[in-house]
């Protein structure tokens, strides 16, 4: 049985919306990480004395902020993974299950059922 033109059009539209949403989430998280990183680099370049200030014995503000840059990368990655598991993956599975989907006859790994 061949899929109807309406089914295929709906699937294409839903795929474009999902792709656009994924791109926006990825772009927002990327821009946020770039902001954190370059904010730190600008502090290093223009306020080195401030970063040299001690938070406690043997621990400077620069070390703390540098560690926070690394931690922020982990946190943003975890946010993306949680979003992908909660929103993107179920929506992609629904798209694959739509009538007329090229992947409807394939198993979860792309192979034949």
Image (cartoon, rainbow, N blue to C red):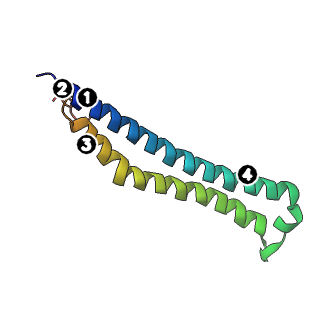
Residue where numbered disc 2 is placed: 4
Residue where numbered disc 1 is placed: 8
Residue where numbered disc 4 is placed: 38
Note whether 40 is above or below 9 in the view shown: below
Instruction: Determine whether, in the image, residue 14 is placed left or right of residue 49.
Output: left
Viewer-proximal residue among 3 and 72 = 3
Viewer-proximal residue among 33 and 70 = 33
Q: Label 2: few (<14), some or many (≥20) within 10 Å?
A: few
Disc nearer the start of the sequence (4/1): 1
The image's mark for residue 94 is 3
Q: Is residue 48 visible?
A: yes
Residue 99, picture quadrant? top left
Q: Label 1: few (<14), some or many (≥20) within 10 Å?
A: some
As helix, strand or loop, the secondary structure at mark 3 comes to helix
Viewer-proximal residue among 24 and 34 = 24
Disc nearer the start of the sequence (3/2): 2
The image's mark for residue 87 is none
- Between marks 3 and 2, how big is the CA–CA gap? 18 Å
């Amino acid at each position: 049985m061949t899929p109807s033109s309406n089914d295929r059009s709906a699937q294409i539209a839903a795929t474009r919306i999902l792709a656009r949403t994924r791109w926006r989430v990825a772009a927002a998280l990327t821009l946020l990480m770039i902001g954190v990183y370059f904010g730190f680099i600008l502090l290093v370049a223009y306020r080195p004395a401030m970063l040299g200030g001690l938070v406690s014995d043997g621990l400077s503000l620069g070390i703390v902020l540098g560690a926070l840059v690394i931690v922020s990368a982990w946190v943003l990655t975890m946010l993306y993974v949680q979003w992908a598991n909660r929103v993107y993956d179920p929506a992609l599975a629904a798209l694959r299950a739509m009538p007329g989907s090229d992947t409807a006859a394939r198993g979860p790994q792309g192979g034949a059922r």
